Structure formats: structure tokens, C-alpha cells
Amino acid sequence: MSIDRVGELGIVGAGGGGFPTAVKLGTRVPLVIANAAECEPLLHKDKELLHHLSGPFLRGMIAAMEMVGAPQGVIGIKEKYHDIIVAMEQQAPKNIRVALLPDAYPAGDEFILVHIVTGRVIPPGGLPKDVDAMVANVETLMNIGLDQPVTQKYLTVAGAVRNPITLRVPIGITIGEVIAVAGGATVDDFSVLLGGVMMARPAAGIDVPVTKTTGGIVVLPSSHKLIQRHTAKWPQIARVGRSACDQCRFCTEFCPRYLLGHPIQPHRAMQSLGFSPSPAEIVAGTLYCCECNLCSLYACPEDLDPKNVCVQSKPAARANGLFFTGTPESVTPHPMAEFRRVPMSRLISRLGLSEFHNVGPLTEHRFSPSRVTLPLKQHAGAPAVAVVKTGQTVNMGDLIAEPEAGKLGARIHASIRGVVRLTHDSVVIDA
């Protein structure tokens, strides 16, 4: 397979980032790391793919290694998945090894993953290639191995549903249709978080379409504290943070990037809410916040929101030119970093998720949607541009949109057969 072929297939980072994979493969590194950590609570998609679809995954990983010129590969898997580890060690070629990861959050952050696997620290604002590595999600590599247009998405449906499962669904189907296959919600008044609960995006409703980066659909009662936290408005976050933060530093001491030695201190960002006459200096490190939400949803004893304060502070930090100016060699991990990893069991308890069944077996279901909605922006970079017209009939796998010349983006393909209808930001296909 060639890099051009990866671009033709519309493959992007399926772990949530959505970065066009063909662009990532356009560099030369000696190591490819498959990210199978999947450290978000209640999600099981990557583990299930390794269990049931190891063939295309390994083909894709070998192809990716060839494209970047990497003689070595590593599959990062949580050490608790003994059966999958044994299977991978038996099936993988000798130049691909398994690295055991802790059952902790956020082991799936690529900076943390690279450090665990290689011992090296990606510099602030850097990329894995800066330490001679490339990281790719399990499903991304599987899509390379399948060698066909990306028209389906694997995801876990979890939380307050009757049957938590992992499914393969047509891209563009509504999340409501997917939830129904999981037995529907177990509560009448529910809300939905897309992705994992830590870095989730609240769904505007159950008519929201599945995209190439939707790795999880988590249903929760609308009264659940995670729904309240993810839907809180900035004025409230700032007001409460300004009045209640006592500068205990817990947010900083648990920050994964701070523990790697990056210049990020969430407690100083909290000061910028009003405790300092020089906010620009206080937000100096917030550019390097990875937005994992550990500070807000786990570390803070006051249930404040340092993550969102960091996010809001990033524009000010950029405007004042507060970028990391040190050398990569100057970045030294905290001596206690290994001992401050947050165990998944503790995190699940702290988040109020213990009542939900923590499983997600891969289950085959034949979807027959009457309509799919394919957003033109479902990847990093610029939106794709439609290459079809309203009224045109397309088959599954047909190209319907592609990046504008010279811009970062990814191709989009029809996920069902039907008739096209264009909107300002999507291609709708009616079966």
C-alpha cells in the first residue's frame, strides 16, 4: 500500500483526533506505536478490535511501518488484558512487540504513551516524530489493513443503556439509532456524551450523526454530575473558580503533562481568574494543557474547573507569545510521575460511574438507515468540498467530498446507497 492510497481511502485518526493519516505517514521514523490504551472509562472499542479483527490490524500496522521506514513496532496494551496480550505476542511478527500499560488515566495520551514505551519525552508543543516515533490508533491501523474506503465506524455504546456493546455502524447514522440497538436508555430523561466521559463533547440531541472520530456514545441521566460539568457555562465556571479556589495545587500535582516536565501549572491558570494583576504571566503554561480533564473531574477537591480555565487562557498565552523556549533536553519528568497515575477503578468511582456495567462486547448488527448525514468537517483541517450534486445517486464507497487543493483534510465516501441532498455543511444521502 502507498501513502497516496491511504489518502484516497479517507483514513483519519479514529481515536478522536481525526488527523489525516496520509499526512502523518509522510515522515520517516524508526518506530510505530499502536495506541490500544483506550483509557477513557467504559469504552472497549480498541480492545474488541484487537480481539476480533487482529488480522487487518496487523496488516495495517506492518504497512504503516513500511511507509514510514520503521524497522520496529510496538503495540501498547493495558496489562490487564492478558488474553489479548498473549494473542498479539503469538500473531505479531518478531519486529513488533507488546508494551504493557497501566490501567490508569490517561495512559492513552500519546505523550504519556510514548514516554512509557520509549522513556523519551515529547517536547512541549511537539509531536511523536520529534522523538523518532509515530503513534496511531488501533482502528486507524485496521482501516489501513482493510484497504477500502472508510464508510463504517466502530464505537462503544455505554452507560445508562440496557446492553452496553461495541458496534460497527455506517458513518452518518444518528446516535439515536445506535442507542436503540444497545437496548435504548434505561432512564427517561437522559443526555449523551460523545467520546469518552473525560474529554467528551455533549451531544446536541439524538439526531447528531456518527462521524469518523466518534469512538463512544455514553448515555447518562441528565441529572448526572458529568452532564452538569460538561454543560456548565463559562461565566459560572469563572465566577465559582474566582471565589472558591484556595490554591491547593492538587490540579497541578496530578496534571499528566506537568508530571512529564512540561511548563503547565493549572493552579496558576486559576490565579488568572482574578488573583493576579498580570494574567499573561500566570497563563504562560496553559498552551500545553492536553485537556484531559483530570484536574477538573478528579484532582480538584472543590469541584472547580481548571481545565476550562486553561482552555480559555490559551488565546491570551498565544497573544503574549508565551511559548516554550527551552531545549528538549531541559524537559525532565517529575520524580513522582509514576506514582501519581490515576487507577481506572478510582476514576470510575470518583466520576459516579460505578453503577454502570463496564463491558462492551463487539456485536454484529446489520443497520439499514433510511438516511445518513455526512458532515463535510469530520477531521482535522479544512472541511471537505462536495464533489456530488443534489439528486445524484451514489453507491456505498463512492467519493462524495474531498479536500480543497492545497489544504489539510480528508476524503469522505458514501456509507449507504441512495440519493444525494446537499446542505451548507453536509452531504445527506436518502436510501
Image (cartoon, rainbow, N blue to C red):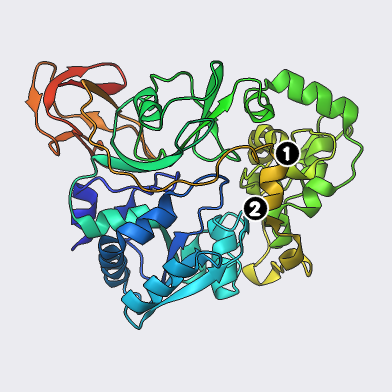
Q: Which mark is residue 344?
A: 2
User: In front: 363, or 374?
Assistant: 363
Residue 431, relative to residue 168: is it above or below?
above
The amino acid sitting under disc 2 is Met
Residue in front for this viewpoint, 276 or 371 = 371
Determine the image quadrant of residue 358.
Answer: top right
Q: Which labelled disc corresponds to residue 296? A: 1
Secondary structure category for the residue under label 2: helix
**In which image quadrant can residue 376 be found?**
top left
- Quarter of the figure with the C terminus: top left
Q: Could you tell me which residue is drawn at 84 percent across and 39 percent down?
A: 301
CA gap, disc 1 to disc 2? 16 Å
Q: Which type of secondary structure does the marked residue at label 1 adopt?
A: helix
In the rendering, which numbered label is found on residue 181? Answer: none
**Eyeballing the image, is 204 above or below 36?**
above
Residue 283 shows in this picture? yes
Q: Residue furthest left?
A: 393
In the image, residue 275 lies at what x, y percent?
89, 32
Mark in the foreground, 1 or 2: 2
Eyeballing the image, is 425 above or below 155? above
Between 152 and 364, the one nearer to me in the picture = 364
Direction from residue 306 to residue 142 in the image, left or right? left
**Dot 2, crowdedness within 10 Å: few (<14), some or many (≥20)?**
some
Q: Earlier in the sequence, mark 1 or mark 2?
A: 1
Q: Amino acid at mark 1?
A: Ser
Task: Please tell me which residue is depicted at 53% across the width and 58% down the height of the picture.
Answer: 110
In this view of the protein, can residue 92 be seen by the observer?
A: no
Can you give x and y, in whole percent of width and height, for residue 14 in the image? 38, 47
In the displayed structure image, the side of residue 197 where residue 96 appears, left or right: left
